[in-house]
Amino acid sequence: MSGVTFEAGARRPGTRRTGNVLIWIAVVLGALAMIFPLYWMFATAIRPRSEVFQPVVSLIPQVLTLENFRNVAQRHPFLTWVMNSTFIAVIAVVITVSANLLCGYVFAKFRFPGRDILFFAILGALMIPIQVILVPEFLVTSWLGLLNSPWGVILPRAAEAFGVFMVRQFMVSIPDELIEAARLDGASEMRIFLRIVLPLSKPIIAVLVIFTFMWRWNDFAWPLVVLTDQELFTLPLGLNLLRGEANPDWGGVMALALISLLPMLLIFLIFQRYLVQGIASTGLK
Amino acid sequence: MTNVNGTGTAFSRRHILGAGLALSAASVKPLRAQAPVSLNFAVWGNRAEEDAFRRLIAGYTAQNPHVSIRLELSGSSGQLYQQVDTRLAGRQAPDLVRIQYQQVGRYAKAGAIVDLSGHLDGGLAAQFAPALWKAVTYRDKAFAIPHHTDTLAVYCNMEMFRRAGIELPRRLEDSWRWEEFIRIARMLKDKAGAPFGFACAWQNTAAYRFLPFLYQNGGKLLDEQLLQPQLSSKEGLEAIAWAQSWFADKLVPPTTSIKTNEQTQNLFANGTIGMLVHGDWQIPFLQDAMKQAEWQVTYMPRNVSMASDLGGNCLAVTRDSKNRDVAIDFLRYATNEANMRDFCVAAGFLPVRRSLMDTKLEYPLRPDAMQVFVEQSRTIPDHLAATVTLPDFSRINTKLGEQLDLAFTSGQSPKDTAENIEGTIRSVLKG
Amino acid sequence: MSDSAVMASSVRPATAARTRRSFRRPWMLPYLLITPNLLLFSAFSFFPLLYAFYISFHDWSLIGEVTYAGLANYRRLVADTQFWHALLNTAVYAVASVPTTMAGGLLLAVALNRRMPGRVFLRSVYFLPVVVSAVATGIIAAWMFNEHYGVINSLIVRLGGDRIPWLSSPAWALPSLVIATFWVRVGFCMVVYLAALQSIPTLYYEAATMDGASPYRQFWKITLPLLRPATFLLLILNVIHSFQVFDLIYVMTGGGPGFSTTMLVQYIYQSAFMTSEMGYASAIGVVLYVIVLGFTIIQWRVSRQSENVL
C-alpha cells in the first residue's frame, strides 16, 4: 500500500501544486488589472492639474496634492450631495427591501387567482429600458407633486422587479411544513412572516440591501430629470455637473468619483460575507 | 418633515418681510401689493458664467426684495434642453431659460416660450445687433432677448509657431487662405514637432460649426430663401472634401470628428495639436491649464470669403411661468447695458447691444485674444445666422453631424454625404 | 430538480388543500400584501409603458401638441436604415460582451472556489467594479482609453508600441466598450457562479474521483451541467443589461465614430431629445421591449424544457 500510493501521491500533489501556483499568479495578475482603473482614478485625483494631460503619463504621480479635493469642496456643496445620496439610498433600501420581501413571499407561498399573470407582468417590468418610459414616468411623478424632492427619486424606483424575483426564488425553498406547523399552533400570518420567514431570509436580505443600495446610490438618468435644485443633487448628478461640457476639471471629477465610491465600498465590505451565500440560496442549485 | 417645516417658516417670514416692504413702498409711491414671487432660472455654464449669473440674480433681488430666483445649473446645453423639454411636457418648466439662438425657433414654434412683443418697448429692437435680434424673432415677434454672442477663431501654440518660423496675421484682412492654413498645419507637424496640426471643436451637438468653412468657400446649406438645400453645389462638395482631407492627411487627430466626446481644448493644452478652432469662452481654461507654452489667437482661415460661427445665447420665459411679468422684467434687467457688459467681461463673451459693440470692453483676461474674437464676429454671414435659427434646425444639425462623421471616419464620399443631408433637409423643411 | 424538490412538489397540493380547509386565510390577504408593490409598478412602470405605446401612434415634439399619426412611426421604422443599423450594433454588442463576461466570470469562480492565499480579498477585488456607478465607469474608461493622454496608450507607447485609436476608429470602438463592460460585469457573473458552485455537493466530486475521472472531465460532466440554472439566470440578466446599456456609451463614445457604437437605446434617446420626435422614439422603444421580452420568453421555454428551473 505504502509504496504505490507514495509514488503516486508524491507526483500528483507536486504537479497540482505548480498548477495551483500558476492559477494563483494568473488570478492575482487579473486582480491587478481589475483594480488598476480605480488606482488610476486615485492617481489622477491626487495629481496637480499640470500633470494630468501629459501625452505620456507617469504611473506614479510625481507630486501629491489635495488641491483637487479642496477645489471640489470649495466650489460645490458636495457634503450636501453626500447627505442627499445617503438619505435616498437608505430610505430606498428600507422601502424596497420591505416591499420586495412581502411581495416575493406572497408569490412564493400563496396560491391565488392571477398569481402567475401578475408575477410575469412584474418580471416584464425588468425589461423596460428607462429611456422608453422616461417621459411618461416623469409625467406621473409630476402629477403626484414629487418633482424636485428626494421622494421623486425614491418612490418611482421603490418596486424592483429583480428584487421580487430573487426573493421569490429564495422563499420557494423555505419548507411549507414550517409555515403549516406555525399555523397549526395558531400563529397569525403577521407573526409567521416576522418570526419564521424573516429570520430564515437573512442571506437574501443581505443581497437585496447591497444591490438596492448600489442601484440608488449610482442612479443617474432618473434623478437627472427629477432633481433640478443643486442643493438636492445626488453624487452622480454632481459628478455629471463637474464633467459638464465647458471645461471639466478632471482632477476634481476623479476626486469626487473617488469620494462617491467610498460609502459603496463600506456597504460592500460589511455585507460581502453574505453576498455569495445569499445568491447561493436563491435556487441556483 | 423638517424640510417642509423649513420652507414653511421661510415662506411666512418672507411673506411678512414682503408685506412690510410693500407697506413702506406704498408710502413712497402707490405700487401694486408685492406678493412674494419665486422664479426658477435654468442655465448651463462654466464657473465664470455661473458666478456671473449669480451676481446678476443678487443684483435683481436686491432691487426687488419680494422676488427670489433660484439658479438651476445643468451639466451641458444638451442636458438643459432634455430637462426643459421633459418638464415642458409635464407643464413644470422653469420660468426662465438660457437657450442658444439655434433653439429659439424650435421653442417659439411649439409655443413653449412666451411671445415678448407686447411686453417690450418699441425701441428695444433697434438697440440690438440686427442679426441677433432677427435670431430671437419668430414670425416677426420677439420670443427671447439676446444676451451675448461668441464666435470661433484659431488658438495658436506660439512655442510651435516660433519653432516652425511662422508669423500670425496682424489684421483681419490678412487672415490665412485655406491653402496657407493647410501649409501651416503641415509645417507644425513636420517642423515644430506637433503630433497633429490642429483640431476643430465641433463635437457632439456642435456640428453646425462646420458651416463657417462652407461659407468661406462661397457655399450655403440652404438657398437664398431658405426653402431648398444647396449643399450639393460645387462649393458645398469642396468644403466637405476639404474637411475630409484633414482626417485623411492626418492633419487633425482622428478623435476630433463629430460623434465623440473628445475635449479638443485638452489636446491643445497638452501640445497634441498646434492650432485649435474654438470659441472665446475657452480663454479662462487655457489661461489656467496651459502652462508650458504661450498661446495667441488669430483669425479664422478664409477662401473666397471670410466667415465664422454664430454662437452665444439669449434668455427666454417659458409658457409654464406663473409670474410672467416679473420674469420678463428680469429679462429686461439681465440684458440692460450695464449688466450685459458685466456678464460679457466676466465670462469672456461678446456683447450684442449696439452701444457696447461700438465701445471697447475692458476684458480682464487676455484682452488681446478677445479683440480677435470681436473682430472675427463681424464676419458671421447673415445667411448663416438665418439658417441656424430656423425652427427645425436641430433636426438638420443632428443629420449634419452624423453624416459628416461618416465622411470623416468611415470614408463616405462628399457627394453621398451632401445628398443624405439634403434628403433630411427636404423632409424637415416640407413638414 | 433535486430529490427534495420533487418530494416537496408532490406533497404540496395536499398540504395546500388542508390549509384551505382548516384555516380561514382571508382570500384578499395575498392581494393586500402585494398592493404596495403593485401600486408602485402600475404608476411607474406599467402605466408609463402603456403611455409610451399610445404615444408611438402619435407625433409629439414633447414641447408641442400631440397629433395622431396612425402607423406612420412604425412604417418609418421598417424603412429606416439607421434603426436596423442600431439593432445590428446592439446584437453585435450583446454577442460580443455577454459570452466573454460570462466565461470570465465562470473561470474566476472556478479558480476562486479553490483554497488559495488571499481568496476573500481577491474575490472582493473582482467584484469591486460592480459597485462603481455607470457615470464614474464611463468617465474613468473614457479617461483611460483616450488616444492622446490616456494611460493605456501611454503604457503601449512606453513598451514601444503604436497608439491604438481606441475610440476614434470604427474597428476599435466596440472592442473598447466590450472591455469596459467586461470590467463592470465580470464580478457579478463570478459571484453568481461562485454561489452556484458552492451549492454543488462535494459528494459528486468524491464519487467521480473514486471512479478515476480527471478534474477536467469532472468539470465538463459535473460542474457545467449543474451550473445550468446559474448560466440561465446570468444569460437573461446580461442580455437584458446589454440591450439597455446607455450611460457607459453616452460618456465613452457618444455613439460614434459613425454609427459604430450607436445602440437602440442611444437611438431612442437621440430621437426623443435631440430631434424631438417622441412618437418615433416610443415606437422604437416598443419594438425594443418586444424584442427583449420575446428573447427572454424563448430562453425561458428552452431552459424549462431541458431543466425545469422555475
Image: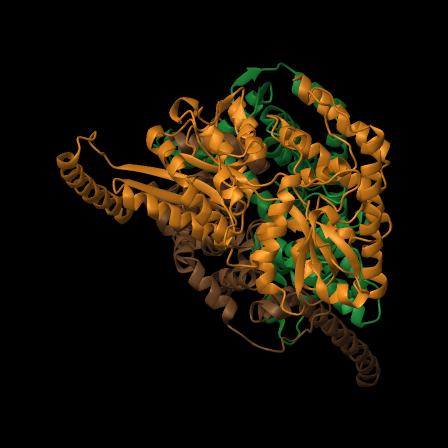
Chain colours: A brown, B orange, C green
Residue C271 sits in quarter: top right
Q: Position of residue C57 (x, y in %)?
A: 60, 18
Residue A20 sits in quarter: bottom right
Residue drawn at point x = 78 percent, y = 74 percent? A19
Q: Is residue A246 above or below residue C91?
A: below
Work out whether residue B339 or residue A105 is closer to the camera in this orientation and state it.
Answer: B339
Residue C159 sits in quarter: bottom right
Q: Position of residue B415 (x, y in %)?
A: 85, 31
Residue drawn at point x = 73 percent, y = 57 percent? B168
Q: Is residue B296 above or below residue B334?
A: below
Regarding residue C36, the answer to whether it shows in the image is yes
Work out whether residue A27 or residue C198 is closer to the camera in this orientation and state it.
Answer: A27
Q: Is residue C1 above or below residue A29?
A: above
Taking the image as shown, residue A273 lies to the left or right of residue B393, namely left
Regarding residue A105, the answer to whether it shows in the image is no
Work out whether residue B363 or residue A93 is closer to the camera in this orientation and state it.
Answer: B363
Q: Position of residue B247 (x, y in %)?
A: 82, 48
